[in-house]
Image (tube, rainbow, N blue to C red):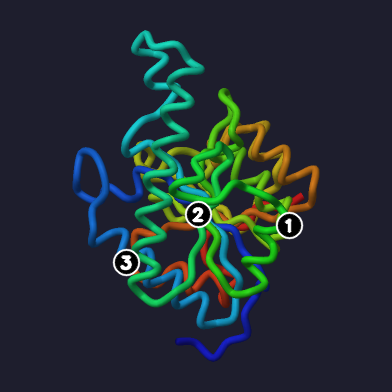
Amino acid sequence: MTDAPVLYRRVLLKLSGEALMGELDYGIEPEVIQRIAAEVAAVRKLGIEVAIVIGGGNIFRGAGLARAGMDRVTGDYMGMLATVMNALAIQDALEALDLYARVMSAIQINEVCEDYIRRRAVRHLEKGRVVIFAAGTGNPFFTTDSAAALRAIEVNADVLLKATKVSGVYDSDPQINADASLFDTVSFDKVLVDKLNVMDATAIVMCRDNDLPLRVFSMAEKDTLVQAMTDPDVGTLVTA
């Protein structure tokens, strides 16, 4: 645990569904989700309120199903249900560490989780509970990136944290170009104009227009999430 002052009071962490797979080709790797839960627990010990949005790409991805011939709306709803499954798995892992966690869904599944109500979500956060937002925005054609930006704005998060497989935002794909340069900071407009593929354009515009800073970093290494709470040099900061 660090003694450095924390940078944020309330954060929203965006995780991809693929982040839960680990070395698997499909589904959830228990060791990965346990490590993520442990890092979230460490952030809570710093006194920071934590919300999470998780994708469903490890189970279903609506756009991919549509490319395979399925109706896009049907595929997107299947993707939303996949995010609920992932959210319940994260909730279970957090509760195993004696953290209070709530799953709030944008579509009604009252037997397994709460409906998303903004004021209730804020109250959960104020009481120290980790809130996991599931089912995206509840609408087809919107990604979980857009849902993350929307929920972060709605609950007045100080920052949107985007966990990726790389160390931050590069001027080109570092997995293809070995000479790609990492940005310490970059503007939302440059991300949009240069198509840097940080998040989808809708999410970037929402962050820009609502003055919500975005920090992009890698969770591939242990404790990076905790470091991002105290070290302003972790990853890339995207601002206006």
**Where does label 2 land, which residue?**
103
Q: Nearer the viewer, residue 147 or 203?
A: 147
**Where does label 3 land, which residue?**
35
Earlier sequence position, callout 1 versus callout 3: 3
Instruction: Say whether residue 22 is visible.
Output: yes
- Furthest-top residue in this view: 69
Instruction: Please rate how many residues cluster around mark 2, counting C-alpha atoms within 10 Å: few if below 14, some from 14 to 19, many from 20.
Output: many
Percent coordinates x, y for residue 193 in the rendering: 67, 31
Instruction: Please rate how many residues cluster around mark 1, counting C-alpha atoms within 10 Å: few if below 14, some from 14 to 19, many from 20.
Output: few
Amino acid type at mark 1:
Arg
Earlier sequence position, callout 3 versus callout 2: 3
Q: Is residue 92 above or below residue 208?
A: below
Instruction: Say whether residue 236 is visible.
Output: no
Give the foreground label among 3 and 2. Answer: 2
Percent coordinates x, y for residue 211 in the rendering: 78, 52
**Where does label 1 land, which residue?**
119
Marks 1 and 3 sit apart, C-alpha to C-alpha, by 30 Å
Does residue 218 appear to the left or right of 129 in the view shown? left
Q: Nearer the viewer, residue 206 or 41?
A: 41
Instruction: Please rate how many residues cluster around mark 3, counting C-alpha atoms within 10 Å: few if below 14, some from 14 to 19, many from 20.
Output: some
Percent coordinates x, y for residue 183 in the rendering: 57, 53
